[in-house]
Amino acid sequence: MKIILLIILFIASATLPIQICGQNVEVFIHSFRSTQGQVIVSVFKDNPTFQEEKPFLTKTLKKSDMVNGILKTTFTLPAGVYGMALLDDENSDKVMKYNFLGIPQEGFGFSNYVHKTLSRPVFSDFDFTVTENKPCKVVMTVQYF
């Protein structure tokens, strides 16, 4: 009898939906030079995935959703350490456009960090921690050369 009860409980638990706990992360993006194109925000978990450009999550936003020059979005992320990078994809081709010297011609930005050099930042420059049941806000400033 116990075995039958265990089998029934196992089957019943296997059919229940799995809930993934996550925290809402509010993202505010500002300092756009134009309203043309789209914005691609990528979420990374560590420096290797950032350097290899293999994001954990990516979201494409319409610049037409801007209000007073600020684009707002929300990500639901499990507790952990993350970093965000964005591309102001003005020509909507989904890749960064560079000039002949290798200098970006479209905007870019990072979570809670303003990059001041031509070299690529490391993950620890712009990482942030998501804690369960604690509000999280990220500000991204779009930069241009």
Image: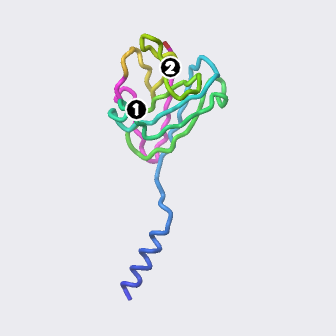
Up the image or down, 11 lies above or below 66; here it is: below
Q: Quadrant of the N terminus?
A: bottom left
Up the image or down, 119 lies above or below 78; here it is: above
CA separation in Å, label 1 and label 2: 15 Å
Q: Residues within 10 Å of mark 2 (few under 14, many from 20)?
A: some
Q: Earlier in the sequence, mark 1 or mark 2?
A: 1
- Give the residue at the far bottom of this rendering: 1
Question: Which residue corresponds to the image point at 45% horizontal and 11% vertical from the top-left?
Answer: 100
Q: Position of residue 42 (x, y in %)?
A: 47, 34
Nearer-the-camera pick, 76 or 42: 42
Q: Position of residue 32 (x, y in %)?
A: 58, 20
Q: Amino acid at mark 1?
A: Glu
Snapshot quadrant of residue 51: top left
Q: Position of residue 75 (x, y in %)?
A: 52, 41
Asked if the residue under mark 2 is in contact with the one under mark 1, i.e. CB atoms within 8 Å, the reply is: no
Q: For mark 1, what is the residue?
A: 53
Snapshot quadrant of residue 38: top right
Up the image or down, 118 lies above or below 41; here it is: above
Q: Amino acid at mark 2?
A: Lys
Q: Is residue 60 magenta?
A: no
Label 1: which secondary element: loop
Q: For mark 2, what is the residue?
A: 97
Q: Residues within 10 Å of mark 1 (few under 14, many from 20)?
A: few
Label 2: which secondary element: loop
With 34 as the anchor, is 113 left or right in this view? left
Q: Which residues are magenta?
A: 121-144
Nearer-the-camera pick, 93 or 73: 93
